[in-house]
């Protein structure tokens, strides 16, 4: 080992935090088209400003000293954690580390006790077509960005650190384990995992006993959600065939989960239906605009 190479025991903590940030960035980037293009199919919507926030208090006390240094959360207040690629927030040059001072001239308090108030300011502030977000950059410069929030499905996608390969939903959020994300290098395949869980949320499957029929329905819904978002569903099925991922920890002898062959046939028939609709509306600017669940 050369003297300059970092020793693993020195960097593990930073690596974990950096990895967590990277997982979150990828997950929100891949989930964003699914959430925005399918807002009309989702039971609840939010206004998505194109950036996500965090505070030092969001992190466990044991890692706060590290979060202060690594994430630039030196002072109390609300900071941008991530800016979504392709959003107007990105075009307006908002950046991770910027502190949010006000939204539509309503001040954001840096007192942790005001968290509920701050959340209300954010929520109301993004109802308008154009929102004014005043920030202080990491260099101390203050400026006001004019962003255009978008209506999106209120189905957050979150990374869970786990060795288990699993996509899951509690009926409200989509939870993807770090092990699954690492095993799915292709974004189209990751989008399929997210879209499948979104299907469970939209159809309210969490309130019904698990069954093969619900799994197959979530698979079909996933292809519809993906096609409407601009993902290539033909590729998605092809990737899936090559790297069928475990799901809900389901095993071969678990009768509530369909076999890989059954899932594949189900994917194929839905793919055929979607391709037919695409062919029929080839001349439309948005051929999948009216595509709905089968
Ligand atoms: Zn499922």
Image (spheres, rainbow, N blue to C red):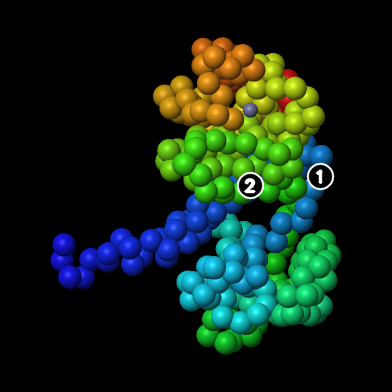
Q: Is mark 2 within 8 Å of ligand 1?
A: no
Please report the residue visible at 31 percent of the width from the left and 61 percent of the height from the top: 8
Secondary structure under tag 1 reads loop
Residue 182 picture location, percent across and down: 43, 43
Outermost residue on the front side: it is: 62
Please report the residue visible at 69 percent of the width from the left and 18 percent of the height from the top: 211
Q: Is mark 1 within 8 Å of ligand 1?
A: no
Residue 14 picture location, percent across and down: 42, 65
Note whether 30 is above or below 202 in the view shown. Answer: below
Secondary structure under tag 2 reads strand
**Are the residues tagged 1 and 2 within 8 Å (C-beta)?**
no
Note whether 266 is above or below 31 in the view shown. Answer: above
Residue 158 picture location, percent across and down: 61, 49
All told, the count of numbered labels is 2
Query: Would you name the residue on which mark 1 appears?
Result: 44
Q: Left or right of 228: which side holds 262? A: left
Q: Left or right of 134: which side holds 81? A: left
- The mark lying in front, picked from 1 and 2, is 2
Q: Which of marks 1 and 2 is nearer the N terminus?
A: 1
Query: Would you name the residue on which mark 2 appears?
Result: 157
Q: Left or right of 103: which side holds 286? A: left
């Amino acid at each position: 080992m050369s003297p300059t190479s970092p020793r693993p025991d020195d960097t593990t903590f930073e690596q974990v935090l950096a990895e967590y940030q990277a997982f979150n960035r990828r997950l929100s980037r891949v989930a964003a088209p699914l959430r925005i293009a399918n807002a009309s199919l989702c039971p609840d919507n939010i206004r998505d400003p194109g950036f996500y926030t965090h505070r030092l208090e969001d992190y466990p006390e044991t890692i706060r000293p590290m979060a202060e240094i690594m994430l630039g959360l030196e002072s109390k207040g609300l900071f941008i954690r991530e800016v979504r690629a392709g959003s107007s927030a990105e075009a307006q040059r908002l950046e991770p580390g910027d502190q949010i001072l006000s939204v539509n001239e309503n001040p954001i308090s840096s007192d942790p006790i005001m968290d509920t108030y701050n959340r209300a300011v954010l929520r109301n502030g993004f109802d308008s077509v154009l929102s004014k977000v005043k920030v202080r950059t990491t260099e101390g410069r203050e400026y006001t960005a004019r962003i255009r929030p978008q209506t999106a499905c209120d189905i957050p996608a979150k990374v869970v650190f786990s060795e288990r390969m699993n996509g899951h939903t509690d009926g409200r959020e989509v939870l993807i384990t770090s092990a699954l994300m690492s095993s799915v290098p292709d974004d189209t395949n990751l989008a399929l995992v997210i879209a499948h869980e979104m299907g469970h949320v939209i159809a309210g499957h969490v309130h019904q006993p698990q069954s093969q029929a619900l799994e197959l329905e979530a698979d079909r819904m996933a292809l519809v959600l993906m096609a409407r978002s601009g993902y290539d569903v033909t590729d998605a099925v092809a990737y899936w065939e090559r790297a069928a991922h475990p799901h809900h920890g389901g095993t071969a002898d678990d009768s509530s989960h369909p076999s890989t062959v059954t899932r594949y046939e189900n994917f194929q028939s839905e793919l055929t239906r979607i391709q037919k609709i695409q062919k029929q509306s080839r001349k439309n600017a948005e051929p999948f605009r009216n595509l709905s669940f089968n």
